[in-house]
């Protein structure tokens, strides 16, 4: 199946789930339960490209249900798929057994609960038959509805179930976790809502143990309420197959080479004149392959430097971007492993986070940072006592994460007036910030500012080496 087609199908399914199907209205209008279910099934047709749909429908109170499942013509496989579909009905009846018992005693005027099950199906060129049941259920009088996925993949050549062990080495799970984590954390709004933070997306929780397989992608499904609040629906993540290269059983065994990263020297031709004005640009929350690289393109073009406060798990995903930051003579500080508010952590948790993050930096660039910018700029005595770095905040906040607008970012900086000695906060993950930087860097140079790293700013403007545990913030960077 074409990649674009699958994407389209999946998107359609999500949209149907989120908007197309008013489950509450189905539940409250008993007469139209079957009609509404049929309408839903019709909407699903375009995402059913393998097998002929069969239906099991009952409009009996108090537990009506409408279930459809495909039949492809391979007897043993069809039997298993049908069994899975009927099991969903049994589970539903057991779940609402009380409602059933109550209805046996009195004739209830309306249904107590509802169940509709549809599916997406497709076949790969290798005859892998994918059926993903989408189960929706809830109580008739409740706004709360559940959406769960049930994934079945069969190899039609053998009639056997197809599991990850038929395709992958175990290392694929780590790649899935990395991809899915960056997918859900690319946007700060979504990132903050993931249950349990990035730990909540850990492979150890079993999220990546099952999936659907197309010719171009591996698709992971997440039940409603499993990783995100209900308003986010029941998301799916479509991961291109080449993300897993090296983990396929057909790939040559991966040889783990401990890379000794090159230690590029900072641009030796760059010299600082302490008598001239200087400003330090800083970029948090990266690295990212898009915006960070664009910022680096601008810095490279003008032979300028900045300080990047990188997040550990992202450095693991994109070590080559952090390596490029270093190669261009930029300073790399830590912004923690996964952006927790450190003032909510114990001393032991703070130390553990630093250790984990330091190991990531050591592996990526062959050294550990001397600067730490706490997430949200939020620090206290415990953070200071347990952080083996100088703690750096800022003196100019561009609010780039909020405005996502290059002109607003430039205006915020301009209204500061004299920038000598200032440390400017931006985020290296937004294209709008990269747009602003394209104008900002030449403009600052034209105004006679030297662009320096934060450590250089502390050295030349404050007159000391960055001191461990000391907080450098608004009043220092003036
Ligand atoms: Zn941050």
Image (cartoon, helix red, strand yellow):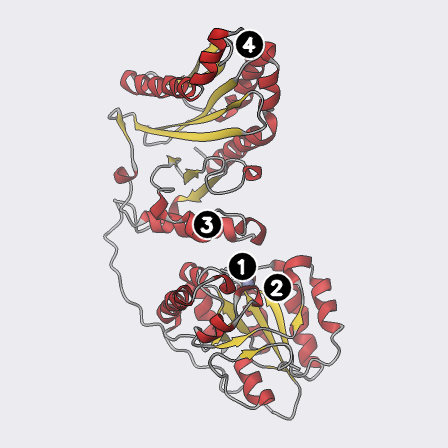
Q: Please name the residue that numbered disc 1 is placed on.
A: 290
Q: Quadrant of residue 162?
A: top left
Local packing at callout 1 (Cα closer than 10 Å; few below 14, some 14-19, many 20+) is some
In whole angstroms, how far apart are the C-alphas of marks 4 and 1?
59 Å
What element does badge 2 sit on? helix
Q: CA distance from mark 3 to mark 1?
A: 27 Å
Residue 249 lies, in percent from the top left, at 25, 44
Counting residues from the start of the chain, the first of labels 3 and 1 encountered is 3
Query: Residue 362 — which label?
Result: none
Viewed as shown, does residue 18 lie left or right of 202? right
Where residue 103 appears, as percent x and y from the top left, is 49, 10
Residue annotated with mark 2: 434
The quarter of the displayed image where residue 54 is located:
top left
Q: Residue visible at 40% across and 29% down?
A: 150
Q: Tag 4 or tag 3, which sits nearer the N-term?
A: 4
Task: Determine the quadrant in which ligand 1 lies.
Answer: bottom right
Q: Earlier in the sequence, mark 2 or mark 1?
A: 1
> What residue is disc 4 on?
108
State the residue in front, 245 or 368. 368
Label for residue 196? 3
Find numbered disc 3 in the image and state the secondary structure of the residue it sits on: loop
Query: Which of pointers 4 and 1 indicates the residue nearer the eye?
Result: 4
Q: CA distance from mark 3 to mark 4?
A: 41 Å
Q: Quadrant of the C terminus?
A: bottom right
Label 4, residues with CA under 10 Å away: few <14, some 14-19, many ≥20: few
Residue 294 in the image: above or below residue 33: below
Q: Up-down: is 122 above or below 408? A: above
Label 3 crowd bin: few (<14), some (14–19), many (20+), radius 10 Å: few
In this rendering, position of residue 361 left or right of residue 379: left
Can you give x and y, in whole percent of width and height, for residue 337 in the image?
A: 44, 62
Looking at the rendered image, the disc whose residue lies closer to the viewer, 3 or 2, is 3
């Amino acid at each position: 199946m074409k990649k674009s087609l699958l994407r389209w199908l999946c998107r359609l399914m999500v949209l149907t789930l989120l908007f197309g199907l008013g489950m509450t209205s189905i539940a409250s209008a008993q007469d139209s339960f079957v009609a509404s279910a049929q309408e839903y099934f019709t909407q699903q047709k375009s995402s059913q490209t393998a097998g002929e749909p069969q239906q099991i429908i009952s409009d009996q109170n108090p537990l009506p249900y409408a279930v459809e499942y495909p039949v492809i013509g391979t007897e043993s496989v069809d039997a298993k798929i049908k069994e899975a579909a009927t099991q969903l009905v049994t589970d539903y009846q057991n779940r609402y057994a009380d409602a059933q018992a109550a209805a046996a005693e009195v004739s209830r005027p309306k249904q107590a609960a509802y169940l509709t099950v549809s599916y997406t199906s497709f076949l790969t060129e290798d005859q892998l038959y994918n059926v993903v049941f989408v189960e929706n259920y809830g109580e008739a009088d409740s706004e709360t509805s559940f959406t769960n996925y049930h994934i079945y993949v069969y190899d039609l050549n053998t009639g056997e179930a197809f599991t990850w062990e038929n395709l992958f080495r175990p290392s694929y799970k780590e790649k899935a976790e990395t991809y899915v984590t960056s997918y859900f954390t690319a946007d700060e709004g979504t990132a903050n809502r993931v249950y349990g933070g990035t730990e909540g997306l850990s492979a150890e929780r079993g999220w990546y143990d099952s999936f659907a397989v197309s010719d171009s992608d591996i698709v992971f499904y997440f039940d409603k309420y499993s990783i995100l609040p209900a308003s986010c629906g029941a998301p799916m993540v479509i991961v291109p197959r080449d993300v897993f290269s090296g983990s396929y059983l057909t790939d040559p065994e991966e040889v783990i080479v401990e890379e000794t990263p090159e230690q590029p020297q900072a641009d030796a031709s760059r010299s600082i004149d302490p008598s001239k004005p200087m400003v330090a640009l800083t970029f948090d929350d990266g690295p990212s392959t898009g915006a960070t690289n664009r910022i680096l393109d601008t810095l490279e073009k003008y032979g300028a430097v900045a300080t990047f406060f990188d997040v550990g798990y992202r450095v693991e995903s994109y070590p080559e971007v952090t390596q490029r930051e270093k190669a261009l003579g930029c300073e790399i500080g830590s912004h923690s492993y996964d952006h927790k508010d450190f003032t909510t952590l114990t001393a032991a948790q703070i130390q553990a986070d630093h250790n984990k993050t330091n190991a990531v930096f050591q592996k990526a660039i062959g050294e550990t940072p001397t600067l730490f910018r706490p997430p949200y700029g939020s620090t206290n005595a415990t953070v200071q006592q347990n952080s083996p770095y100088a703690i750096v905040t800022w003196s100019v906040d561009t609010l780039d994460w909020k405005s996502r607008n290059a002109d607003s970012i430039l205006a915020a900086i301009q209204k500061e007036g004299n920038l000598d000695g200032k440390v400017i906060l931006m985020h290296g993950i937004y294209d709008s910030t990269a747009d602003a930087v394209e104008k900002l860097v030449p403009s600052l140079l034209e105004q006679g500012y030297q662009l320096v790293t934060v450590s250089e700013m502390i050295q030349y403007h404050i007159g000391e080496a960055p001191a461990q545990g000391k907080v450098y913030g608004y009043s220092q960077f003036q």
